[in-house]
Amino acid sequence: MATALTGLKHATAYGSGPTKIGGAQWDADHSVADVVALRAALELTIGPALHVRRTTTQSITSGVTTKVAFDSVVTDTGSAWNAGSNRYTPQVPGWYQVAGMVYCVGSSPTSVAALLYKNGALEVVGFEISPSGASGGFGAPVSTLVEMNGTTDYLELFGNFAATSPVFAATYTYMKILHLRG
């Protein structure tokens, strides 16, 4: 944080005038107390974040809703990811932006769906309907805002792919979660 604040001071000292942050004007004349208050305000807006993904394929049964077994944690700033259960249980209450993708590969596909569950119940679903006879990879995105209690609420990502020899593909199958506010 000190680097960002130093950069701010340099921007105002050598730039073309005062900088505005959050509607407040900041220049070289602000006190240490003002800087401490700004730092506290910025820290309150930055909450836990998660990014998990698949790095290898996951075999699944055609047409059966299956939990995505993420095998790579890119970031987990709140230490809320449980790799054993493939669940995210944030310890900070509030609203979370959730985005996920189930990317599948198989032949003769008919549909792919990404399903986000909260506490074991379906929260939201995203679909891609594939043309008959198509081949290659197919992705279903899902995105929503979810309110979490910060103690027992948890999120899981599932997928359903109707095709011959279906798999959840590596790299493009992911879940990203960001705490927005309490």
Image (cartoon, helix red, strand yellow):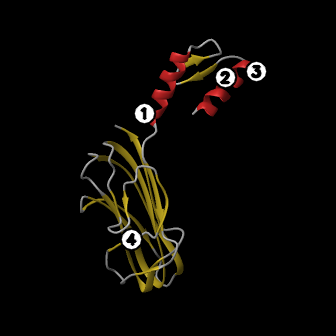
Q: What secondary structure is found at the residue carrying circle 2? A: helix
Mark 3, residue position: 14
Mark 1, residue position: 44
Between marks 4 and 1 in the image, the one whose residue lies nearer the viewer: 1
Q: Position of residue 37 (x, y in %)?
A: 48, 22
Cα–Cα span, label 1 and label 2: 22 Å
Callout 3 crowding tier (Cα within 10 Å): few <14, some 14–19, many ≥20: few
Does residue 136 lie above or below 42 as drawn? below
Mark 4, residue position: 68
Q: What secondary structure is found at the residue carrying circle 3? A: helix
Between marks 2 and 4 in the image, the one whose residue lies nearer the viewer: 2
Mark 2, residue position: 9
Does residue 81 lie above or below 145 as drawn? below
Cα–Cα span, label 4 and label 3: 51 Å
Q: Position of residue 42 (x, y in %)?
A: 49, 31
Mark 2 or mark 4: name the one nearer the start of the chain: 2
Q: What secondary structure is found at the residue carrying circle 4? A: loop
Cα–Cα span, label 2 and label 3: 8 Å
Q: Disc 1 marks which amino acid?
A: Leu
- At horizontal 36% and vertical 84% (from top left) the residue drawn is 61
